[in-house]
Amino acid sequence: MSPHATAVPTATRARPRRTPRPGGRLLAAVTVLATGVLAAGCGVRLETPPPAEPSPDAVEVLRAGAVDDALTVADLVADVTPSVTDPATLAALEEAAAFAEQHADALGGVYDSGLDDLDLPAGDPTSAAPAEDSDEPADDAAGTEEDGTEDDVTADEPGDGAATTDDVVVALAEAAQRTGASADAATDAGLARLLASVAASEHVSAQRLAALTGSAAADVLVTTAPPVEEAPAGIGAADLATLVETEDAAGYAYEVRAAQSEDAARTAAVARAAEHRARGQAWALAAGTDGTAQDPRRVAYVLPDDADVAALARQVESGLAQTYASLVATAAPTSRAEAVALLVDSWASAVAWGEAPAAFPGLPEQTAG
């Protein structure tokens, strides 16, 4: 297997808080209330520390990192959009921002325990000191009209570090890489599947925006997935047989439509047919069924009569995206890198053949919702 990327959480960014999780807020409030009642009943003042923020576990770190990446994209788009005039670029930016918001919501948003909103007792060490107790001015960093410092800079004047569309492409490309690595590492199967889908969406958004703006920032993304060398851990014989047959059938479909097509469509279909046939062979070798009675591959497969090469390609690749999204959930942590890459590759190919971009490729339940 190829080496796996390490999922690295992004740096913490200041974000507007979203709706707190009711359980965390209620538990913290009940804890404080119960402590006060017990102290009053016993007639003894209990010196207890204020409730502390829970430490995030590995799953929360991966989830929060993906949320932060998504909101970073949305923030950058909001900064860049006012200076963009090209309609196609504007549409791509708005789409990327809309997808990013959906990603953040599906992943649970920014976590807020609610502890900062509790009414802490007077004199509590965690409460903020009143402004009048300080010997320094409340806003020493900000300039005044008399001294003429920062007040001379208006929000309407772009600075040297103004965000650009290239920054958005960079953010999308980096998010796609980190989120894909997080999908490989996540110990929660459902989260891994969701992260892999988000990574595929971010990958396609980065490529589309880069193509419109001439940015080279998306060149860091791997655009093709090589055939697998061994089966991911946790994958059974039935799942492997499905992968062998699905990839082989995809190659057959492209070959048939290539024979019925001309020019660029024919060339693209022939190339894609070879890729899928090679993947089917690789999965058969990984499963140990190549050339045996258990090899599920057939000479021919049934194809829809009314689908041209582009329509059939969209159907085939979208179906494979769902297959590989399911494989991500089934495979064991740290053995999903190839499955994630194949999900991304299938979805990028579907969009290249005319499929509409989506926030959650390979997850039909998210699209339906």
Image: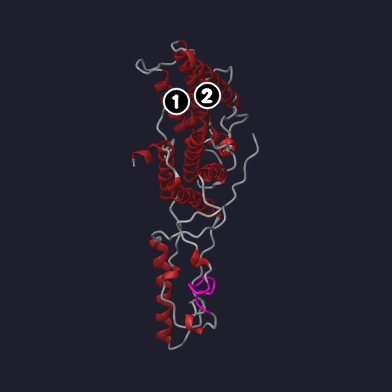
The answer, for residue 307, to whether it is visible in the render is: yes
- From the image, give the main secondary structure of the stretch colored magenta: loop
Q: Residues within 10 Å of mark 1 (few under 14, many from 20)?
A: some
The answer, for residue 294, to whether it is visible in the render is: no
Q: How is the image coloured?
A: secondary structure
Q: Position of residue 41 (x, y in %)?
A: 40, 85
Q: Is residue 61 above or below residue 298?
A: below
Q: Residues within 10 Å of mark 2 (few under 14, many from 20)?
A: many
- Disc 2 marks which amino acid? Val
Chain part drawn in magenta:
137-147
Query: Closer to the camera, 74 or 307?
Result: 74
Helix, strand or loop under label 1: loop
Q: Which residue is mark 1?
A: 353
Q: Which residue is mark 2?
A: 244
Query: Closer to the camera, 281 or 166?
Result: 166
Please tell me which of labels 2 and 1 falls first in the chain.
2
Q: Is residue 254 above or below residue 103?
A: above
